[in-house]
Amino acid sequence: MHIDVKRKVPLYRQLADYLESAIRLGTYSPGDRLQSLRQCAQVNDVSISTVLEAYRSLEDAQLIQSRPNSGHFVAKLPIRLPEPDVSTPPASSATVELPTLVQMVINSENAPDLISFGSGYPSTAQLPIGRVERAMLRAVQRSSGALGRYPVLSGEEVLRQAIARRGLSLGCVLNPKDIVLTSGATESISLCLAALLRPGDTVALESPTSFGFLQILEALKLRALEIPTHPRYGLSVDALSLLLRESRVSAVLATPTLSNPMGTSMPVAERKRLVELLCSHRIPMIEDVIYNDLAGAETHRRAVKSFDHDGWILLCSSYSKTIAPGLRVGWLHAGRFGSQVRMLKSAFSGGNCSINEIALSELLTDSNYNRQLRRLHKINRQLLFDARQTIGDSFPTDTRVTNPTGGSMLWVELPGTINSLTLFTACLDERILIAPGILFSASGSYRNCIRLCISGAWGAEHRRALRRIGELASELLKGVVS
Amino acid sequence: MHIDVKRKVPLYRQLADYLESAIRLGTYSPGDRLQSLRQCAQVNDVSISTVLEAYRSLEDAQLIQSRPNSGHFVAKLPIRLPEPDVSTPPASSATVELPTLVQMVINSENAPDLISFGSGYPSTAQLPIGRVERAMLRAVQRSSGALGRYPVLSGEEVLRQAIARRGLSLGCVLNPKDIVLTSGATESISLCLAALLRPGDTVALESPTSFGFLQILEALKLRALEIPTHPRYGLSVDALSLLLRESRVSAVLATPTLSNPMGTSMPVAERKRLVELLCSHRIPMIEDVIYNDLAGAETHRRAVKSFDHDGWILLCSSYSKTIAPGLRVGWLHAGRFGSQVRMLKSAFSGGNCSINEIALSELLTDSNYNRQLRRLHKINRQLLFDARQTIGDSFPTDTRVTNPTGGSMLWVELPGTINSLTLFTACLDERILIAPGILFSASGSYRNCIRLCISGAWGAEHRRALRRIGELASELLKGVVS
């Protein structure tokens, strides 16, 4: 047995890796029952909670399934696509200069004749737009002249209260007074970064990371320090710990649940370690929780902030991924940095439109929201499963793909000789939009990677387009396309 | 005769000053007819257009009236309140640290039990809020799923077109493609400043200036260089020219029409000189045209940008003062800096809500908008007249007050020993909100000044409150209140 308390890797993860290799090697076959929690704990000389955590992580990877009152079983159809390795970005920080291609990817999104895997937008078909429109109409009718007044800076109290209530599902007790409404998660994050940092300061990020984050860093003239990130367990707390000792990091910006683009979600134990590390170094972290509502497991919905008692974690989010991106309402909770962030909000834009806030508050208190989340999760899981099958069938051998537990993004690592910029251009010639890997790094990494968003009105046309991407990649590999 | 081509002061202004002193001294009496344009030109050895410009400036000051086909006449009731002198701020730049009092003045605005002269907000009673609400309802109904999509970065084309058409009244031919919609003039201005400057750079401003501007400078860590400003003719181009030679100024931020708080409007000739000066120094100017639609005279509606052929002037505005502050829609035209500003907009907040933009576009193309402007102008003139009378009756002798041609702000210079912060507190104790002078300067000037906004539902209660401010000031002067 390979479990060793002296190794740096947490016990539950050593156990999960050990069991996964047993499944992959055929020691366990599909349908086999795993040892009970108690048995497994005794055999491996670990606690039952360690086993539970290990089993959960195997469940997240769709390798095993739990059946109520009967135990854990090896999944029937574990997809055999290998996942990417943990990332290995350079250990020094870099200034950010995103290629102008980013704007092209963003702007192409609304082009009607494109089959888009380009951006992380949810599909209108999956969102309750009819209900949102009705809520807007009611909000206008009930606004009692709100359009004639400048709004209050922090936003409508009724929405701040609704968000605070939803905060319970993040494991956080939030005071509505400390919540500031914004025009979206992007404004939330840029306000927090602008309040915490000065040009030239360094921000630690997951690697690969969201190009939206990199855009903000570039605009604020901040340096990026990319942290090795595991495709399933997220940001490496060990690597961050090491880098905090070696380099001057002024803040961390991360998405611990369903990070963009890898779809990783940190295990609870790592979340705790992360908060302890940050608090001991007195380094603030901006936590983007925009995808938390899309996570299947309650443990992944829980925010890192839920372990923070000292206000070093700043929460940023919006409901653009679950209700309506066009509403333009986001929020933030700036922990101990509330007054600085509020001052910037006042100086840069002032309050936002009350109507949208009132409408959103109605949609959030609505019991339908939880049903909407369950529906979205089910659809997303199905789409991801379907897309991974198609990739497995049609992409070059040695392609690696992430296997996220929710959301709508896949991170694809193609064989190393493929330049994803060339693939991007070849795809665009056939009116297919993908996001090339170099957009997700400040260090020019991920040249052979692409991000695919599987969220549109998925159907035969999309499956065909996805297959076509694989064919084009194979042609590139053979040197047919140069 | 005092007109001298060698003096630095423009000829038309020398002539206007000469005629004004003749009126003030009683050489001309109310109802007297002035010389014809031709006569006056011959007598003073200047061109007819110089006389026309001088007469216009006397009209703006309400000292004379023009009657079609019969000439110019001395006004019947010239208010005898003296105006403040041209301001004399320090000639060196300063970092900006606004007192937290600013937030208090802004936040108090929505307090229901206050009689507010505090902020430059229009009164709901003067705005077409019912029509705005109906336009919002229609926009939601016709949005065809816009709430389900991320908006395009620059905003809805239909509104950019409507704004470009309105641009003609600013004397500007604007390409709708170059217009970027924002969440208000504040976002417009902060995006432009952030795109043009780096922390530590210096911005030249009118003095006194808007505390909103100073807030943005503080947030972006920019230095402020205050330029002497005439209460009627605005920013001194001569002083700016001198300071440009002596100091490193990276940009100018000004409101050439109805500047906040003095309500000054630069004469056309000065606007031309300003553009020439800026272009020759290759220094950009952010021109806030938010009050231009409130100006009575067409010459004051015309933007400085209308004389700019090289893209050095950036236009910023919104319709918060004329249609509805709660809509949160503003715009900018960044001249030669379009791509930089667009990049920041994308990084910091992305596009805004389409619904509000569609609603506003309907209200702008509406022929009612011009009627609304005429109505607003008439109301504002009446309110300002009324308020100035009350001030003349009840404020301490030696009080000076501006006499703006439109808008809703009065800048009051109290006798020098009065500390307007003490007056602010004394007023607040009686539930009256005023804005103390030090908020309008980065150099701690204007301790004895206050800004009064006369825009609420003006009536007996407000007149009483205004009189009370005067009484409190008189008591302060006598040392009754300490």
Image (cartoon, coloured by chain):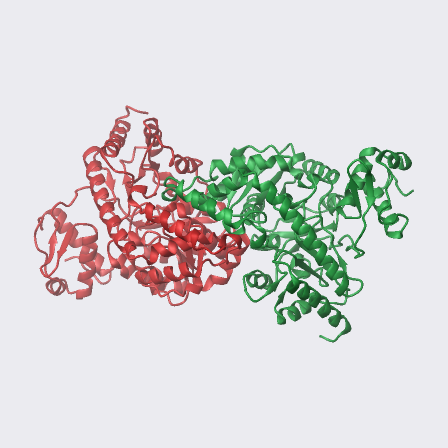
Chain colours: A green, B red
Viewer-proximal residue among A74 and B26: A74
From the top left corner, tell me how far across and down residue A169 is, in percent. Answer: 63, 37
- Residue B173 occupies which quadrant of the picture? bottom left
Vertical arrangement, residue A102 with respect to residue A86, above or below? below
Q: Can I make out residue B218 in this image?
A: no
- Circle count: 0
Viewer-proximal residue among A85 and A426: A426
Q: Can I make out residue B355 in this image?
A: yes
Q: Quadrant of the N terminus of chain A?
A: top right
Viewer-proximal residue among B428 and A138: A138
From the top left corner, tell me how far across and down residue B318 is, in percent. Answer: 38, 52
| Relative side of A287 to B356, left or right | right
| Relative side of A441 to B309, left or right | right
Vertical arrangement, residue B461 with respect to residue A407, above or below? above
Vertical arrangement, residue B182 with respect to residue B410, above or below? below
- Residue at 30 percent across and 33 percent down: it is B417
From the top left corner, tell me how far across and down residue A16 is, in percent. Answer: 83, 44
From the top left corner, tell me how far across and down residue A256 is, in percent. Answer: 68, 45
- Residue at 22 percent across and 57 percent down: it is B13
> Which residue, as the protein is rendered here, is positioned at the far top?
B480
Q: Quadrant of the C terminus of chain A?
A: bottom right
- Residue B46 occupies which quadrant of the picture? bottom left
| Relative side of A482 to A5, left or right | left
